[in-house]
Image: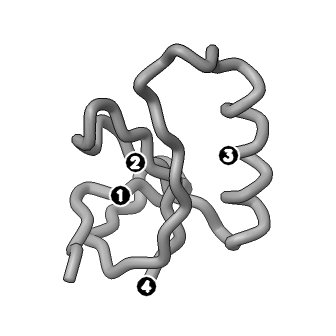
Amino acid sequence: MVFALLLIVDHEIKEHLHMDTLSKCLKAKRFAMKEKNSTDRVVYKCIKSKANVEIYMGEKKITSLILE
């Protein structure tokens, strides 16, 4: 199980970023929301989900989410 910050554009997941904790995810979401305009069709969402993860140069990276 991982926490992921999702970037959703037009109801489609465009990017996902691994977060260590839910609080870090919510903090990153608040920061990202400051930069967006109200007319953007962008939504940020924090989720807890199963995922395929790889470790590259000491950092975890989500290769794919397993949405159930």
Which tag, 4 or 3, sits closer to the chain's start? 4
Judged by depth in the image, the label closer to the viewer, 2 or 1, is 2
Q: Which residue is mark 4?
A: 1
The nearer-to-camera label among 1 and 3 is: 3
Q: Using the numbered discs, state the Cα–Cα distance from disc 4 to disc 2 in whole angstroms.
A: 14 Å
Q: Which secondary structure, mark 2?
A: strand
Q: CA distance from mark 4 to mark 3?
A: 19 Å
Residue hosting label 1: 62
- Residue type marked 1: Ile
Q: Residues within 10 Å of mark 1 (few under 14, many from 20)?
A: some
Numbered disc 1: secondary structure:
strand
Badge 3 element? helix
Using the rendered view, name the quadrant where residue 37 is placed.
Answer: top right
Mark 3 and 2 residues: CB-CB less than 8 Å, in contact?
no
Work out how far the residue at label 2 is from the one at label 1, CA to CA, in angstroms.
Answer: 7 Å
Residue type for callout 2? His
Mark 3 or 2, nearer chain start: 2
The residue lying at 67 percent from left, 58 percent from top is 25
Name the colouring of the figure.
one colour
